[in-house]
Structures are given as structure tokens and as C-alpha cells.
Image (cartoon, rainbow, N blue to C red):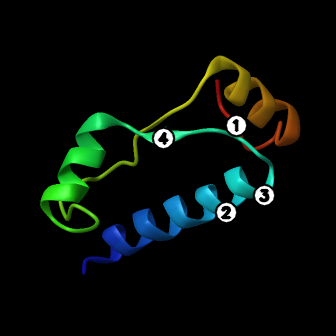
Amino acid sequence: MIKDDKKNIELMDEFHKLAIKNNIWYSIDSKMLYGSLLHSGFVPWHKKNQIMMTVESFNKLKREFPNRVAD
């Protein structure tokens, strides 16, 4: 596994834990989901994590973590 791939996995893991702990809904986007199903896990060439969330979830994320969310 390439160093950047490991960072992406760690970043998604941390975001997932944060979302679950704070009851923030999100989902990975369709391309990332489809690729992970085809490859039984993280897709090696994905260089960015793509998620989607409702406006309400995004606003809650901004409210809870104002210094960590970029608009």
C-alpha cells in the first residue's frame, strides 16, 4: 500500500468515527462506493475521499467543528 493510500484510509476512518460520535449522516459517493465494491476495499488509485451529506448534516458539522470545515 502506498503512503498516500494509507493516509486516505486513516482520514476516512477518523471522519467516520467523528460522524458516528456526533450523529452526522454521510455516505461515500457513488464512484467511491462502486470502486470499493469491485476491489473489496479501498481503491488504490483514489487520490481523494469523496463523501456526500445532507445540508443539515453539513451545517451540524460546521457548527460542531468550525475550525476544521472549509466551505
Residue beneath label 4, please? 27
Residue at the spot 64% in from the left edge and 38% down from the top edge: 25
Residue at the spot 35% in from the left edge and 48% down from the top edge: 48
Give the amino acid type for the residue marked by disc 2 in the picture. Answer: Lys
- Mark 2 or 1, which is nearer the eye? 2
Name, please, the residue furthest toward the top: 55
- Mark 1 or 3, which is nearer the eye? 3
Q: Which mark is residue 21?
A: 3
Residue at the spot 24% in from the left edge and 57% down from the top edge: 36
Q: Which mark is residue 22?
A: none
CA–CA distance between discs 1 and 3?
Answer: 17 Å
Q: Position of residue 32 (x, y in %)?
A: 28, 46
How crowded pointer 4 is (Cα within 10 Å; few <14, some 14-19, many 20+) is rated as few
CA–CA distance between discs 3 and 2?
Answer: 6 Å
Residue beneath label 2, please? 17
In this picture, is 47 found above or below 11? above
Label 2 close to label 1 by CB (< 8 Å): no
Give the amino acid type for the residue marked by disc 3 in the picture. Answer: Lys
CA–CA distance between discs 2 and 1?
Answer: 16 Å
- Answer with mark 4 or mark 1, whichever residue precedes in sequence: 4
Residue beneath label 1, please? 69
Label 4 close to label 1 by CB (< 8 Å): no
Name, please, the residue furthest toward the left: 38
How crowded pointer 3 is (Cα within 10 Å; few <14, some 14-19, many 20+) is rated as few
Give the amino acid type for the residue marked by disc 1 in the picture. Answer: Val
Q: Quadrant of residue 39?
A: bottom left
